[in-house]
Image: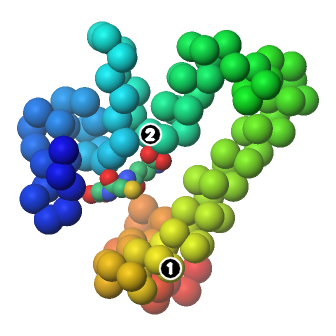
């Protein structure tokens, strides 16, 4: 599937898989999983990969902490900077009320 600029990820067919219109999406039989972290969690659980995603409370929390960093500081930090500088793409601020491009947001 092609994303920018053809926009197949915004087609009605794809939006049935992920209403957010974003990749990646995993289809495993009848199961549809959108979001990279959800996909990794699904695969680890399905394979019983407890060395990657531990079952115990402390081990699971340590993995979730770094997944949160990836979805937070990294996604809105270096990943956003890369989108702006490499792809000249305006990235919106995280605040749902804010319509400013990410790089001009005072928050
Ligand atoms: N939280 C999602 C973010 C997915 C995401 O940002 N995907 C980008 C490509 S890396 C995308 O599909 N962008 C197209 C768009 O938002 O229109 C994940 O980790 O899977």
Q: Which residue is mark 1?
A: 81
Q: Secondary structure at mark 2?
A: loop
Residue at image position (17%, 37%) is 14
Give the total number of marks visible in the rendering: 2
Residue 51 appears at what percent x and percent y?
Answer: 79, 25
Residue 67 appears at what percent x and percent y?
Answer: 67, 45
Q: Which residue is mark 2?
A: 35
Q: Is residue 39 above or below residue 88?
A: above
Is 101 displayed left or right of 59 in the figure?
left
Residue at the right extreme, as displayed = 58
Give the camera-side residue of 41 and 76: 41
- Mark 2 neighbour class, 10 Å CA radius: few under 14, some 14 to 19, many 20 or more: some
The CA span between labels 1 and 2 is 21 Å
Which tag, 1 or 2, sits closer to the chain's start? 2
Q: Tell me if residue 10 can be seen.
A: no
Q: Is mark 2 within 8 Å of ligand 1?
A: yes
Residue at image position (41%, 75%) is 83
């Amino acid at each position: 599937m092609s994303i920018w600029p053809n926009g197949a990820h915004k087609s009605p067919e794809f939006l049935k898989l992920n209403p957010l219109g974003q990749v990646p999406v995993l289809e495993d039989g009848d199961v549809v999983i959108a979001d990279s972290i959800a996909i990794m969690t699904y695969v680890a659980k399905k394979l019983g990969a407890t060395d990657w995603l531990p079952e115990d409370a402390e081990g699971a929390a340590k993995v979730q902490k770094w997944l949160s960093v990836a979805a937070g500081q990294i996604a809105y930090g270096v990943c956003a900077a890369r989108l702006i500088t490499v792809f000249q793409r305006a990235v919106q601020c995280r605040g749902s009320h804010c319509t400013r491009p990410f790089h001009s947001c005072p928050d």
